[in-house]
Amino acid sequence: MANGILILSYLIGSVSFIIGLKMLSHPDSARKGNLYAAIGMTLAILATIFFYTDSNGVYLKNHLWIFGGLLIGSIVGTLAAKKVQMTAMPQMVSLFNGMGGACAAIISIVEFKHMLHAGNTVSSDVVLSSTILIGLVIGIVSFTGSMIAFGKLNGNINDKTLPLQQLINIGLLVLILVLVTGMVSGMIQGDPMTLMYVVLSVSALYGVLFVMPIGGADMPVVISLLNSFTGVAAAFGGFLYDNSVMLTGGILVGSAGTVLTVLMCKAMNRSLTNVIVGSFGGTKQTGGGGSEVGGTYKEISMSDTAVLMMYSKKVIIVPGYGLAVAQAQHICHELEKVLDQNGVEVKYAIHPVAGRMPGHMNVLLAEADVSYDKLLDMDEINPEFAQTDVVLVLGANDVVNPAAKTDPASPIYGMPILNVEDASHVIVNKRSMKPGYAGIENALFFQPKTSMLFGDAKDALTKLVAEIKSMA
């Protein structure tokens, strides 16, 4: 009876994950999809606690410790999620993802010890030992890599490339493969626990050195890639325990993370190898990376901006990280509503790699209750810029840099961008003329149809809304 309930719970949990992931593909249903997946996970956890039995028919014990851990984790996770600012959301995603990788690695360590205590050798059960060791490697790489990504996104760690960095990374990867293969095949002899900790240490070092040189502009891709690593590690854990819901969840996370990584690379017109090896954004450059960029830029006053937008037929807003830093999403929505009330059509242009993580701008604007049908991705919105009176760029930089189309020497050359320069007028709100996250100058700022509106996004938009209301 207990086993039947457990299997049914796992089936329901697996189905809820699949449905939830499907619903996450559209903003309208994303919140419900997340809730459905969470309910399925809760059901699977409770079913495991109360209905799982080992080979001897013994139920899980130590409920006090189990629920104590669940309670502490739930409180910490809830408080952290509620306190985090939208600007720090990428860091939190990296942190939580790293914890998932650490869990997968701990499972492998525990099961490796259980395997040895049961009298097995590493080479006696190739499938079991391979599953444990591969899960360990992927889990610890995900953990250490995510922690480095967290530090870099949080400003605690700078990009750093060692001499012969890529050669060292390749050497570490080869060493990991040799150690795992040698242990499983029995070609490498020695104390199994010592060898396992050597594999763990080398993998941890590889995770650190793998992420350390990757530049800031590539961090969204790295986050997505590390997320897929954690999913794969969890899938190995599910295979290890013959746990269908854990296996399903891991496969879904791993495959979705991989697909997202490929899509992000496509959005940047770069291969994954180029992201990992190229360290784009790691070295600050000027002049578009090759050609000299400069000239004179012109500023625009708040009143002129208000007049220009008030008498436009169509306005497109391009949100970027500066909008998130200023926490200006709510006043941005207020600007949209004020313009809409005065007969101006307003849409938002969302670049796939805007912000610091996939979907950062979508989540930011959804928090301010911006209608989902106004959020258009790059392919949808690009044809509309030519029929747009004013484009308001809020804190975005690299995703609107025309060097991606015109300067072969630029590190972002070939990356698809938002074609804001096709509009009649372009107004760029920035704090200063400093380069964006990729560290390269933006020729857009010096074009004749571009005007600079300097200042904090929240403060500037607040004054702009007030100016437009006074004209209405």
Image (cartoon, rainbow, N blue to C red):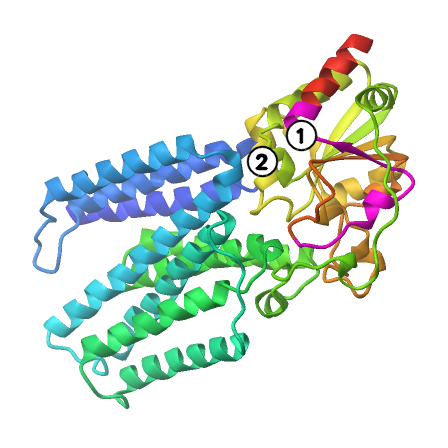
* Residue at the spot 64% in from the left edge and 22% down from the top edge: 331
Tag 1–tag 2 contact (CB < 8 Å): yes
Evaluate whether residue 341 shows in this view: no
* The stretch drawn in magenta includes residue 452: yes
Q: Which residue is mark 2?
A: 325
Query: Which class describes the residues within 10 Å of circle 2: few (<14), some (14-19), or many (20+)?
Result: some
Identify whether 354 is placed above or below 190: above
Q: Residue 333 in the image: state x and y as whole percent.
A: 66, 23
Which quadrant would residue 200 be assigned to in this image?
bottom left
- Name the N-terminal-most of marks 1 and 2: 2
Q: Secondary structure at mark 2?
A: helix
Identify whether 209 is placed above or below 3: below
Q: Secondary structure at mark 1?
A: helix
Q: Is residue 92 left or right of residue 326?
A: left
What is the quadrant of the C terminus in the image? top right
Q: Which residues are magenta?
A: 438-460
Q: Residue 20 in the image: state x and y as whole percent.
A: 46, 41
